[in-house]
Image (tube, rainbow, N blue to C red):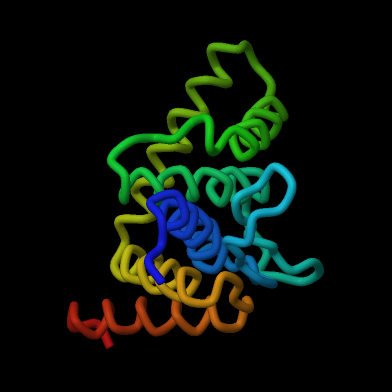
Amino acid sequence: MTNTPAETATAWHEAGHAVVALALGRPVQRVSIEPKLQRLGHCELKKGTFRPSSDIVETEILILLAGLVAEARLTGVYNLAGASEDLRGVRAYTRLRGGSERQVEKLERRMLSKTEHLLEQPGMWLAIEQVAAELLRETTISGRAARHLFEHATKSARESAGGR
């Protein structure tokens, strides 16, 4: 079965969320490209304990933006309409920082740039490609499967760079 361009873009989008969450120490429960209600896919993070972050708000913003950035890497454009729910979440978090609307927008641009930089780290795109490919095969994967693919991709990248 051949996947549609929309399914492929959704797989990359959800893989982006999952990979950045894992990179930032947030455990993933499951990742899916099964359409439900208004969503084409979903990355569900585990509740409970996870590696403490020095800035939980920034971590959440980076995870939310990762889907948009990963999908854009595939398609060449930011799908703002498709990421509208994520972007509403980003706006809610950036408003927590206070300041004028101009300051909020400046913070959002900085967080988008930071997300792009994070995804340029060794192994991150390989991890997204592998998680997306598995989503296109299986529709839904466990957090454990996503973590395995992430760890394998980042380990391979470190070894290729000579940093065992």
Residue 92 position (above or below residue 103):
below
Query: Quadrant of the rendered structure where residue 140 is?
Result: bottom right
Outermost residue toward the right in this view: 48
Q: Nearer the viewer, residue 137 or 84?
A: 137
Q: What residue is drawn where x is 39% and y is 84%?
A: 152
Query: Quadrant of the rendered structure where residue 102 is?
Result: top right
Looking at the rendered image, the quarter that the N terminus falls into is bottom left
Q: Position of residue 43 (x, y in %)?
A: 63, 60
Q: Position of residue 81 (x, y in %)?
A: 53, 30
Looking at the rendered image, the quarter that the C terminus falls into is bottom left
Q: What residue is drawn where x is 65% and y is 16%?
A: 99
Outermost residue toward the front in this view: 1
Q: Position of residue 63 (x, y in %)?
A: 56, 51
Number of residue marks: 0
- In the drawing, does residue 3 fall left or right of residue 146? left
Query: Quadrant of the rendered structure where residue 92 is?
Result: top right
Q: Nearer the viewer, residue 97 or 62?
A: 62
- In the drawing, does residue 163 fall left or right of residue 68? left
Residue 84 position (above or below residue 145):
above
Q: What residue is drawn where x is 35% and y is 67%?
A: 129
- In the drawing, does residue 127 fall left or right of residue 91? left
Q: What residue is drawn where x is 18% and y is 77%?
A: 161
Q: Nearer the viewer, residue 3 or 27?
A: 3
Q: Position of residue 38 (x, y in %)?
A: 70, 42
Outermost residue toward the bottom in this view: 164
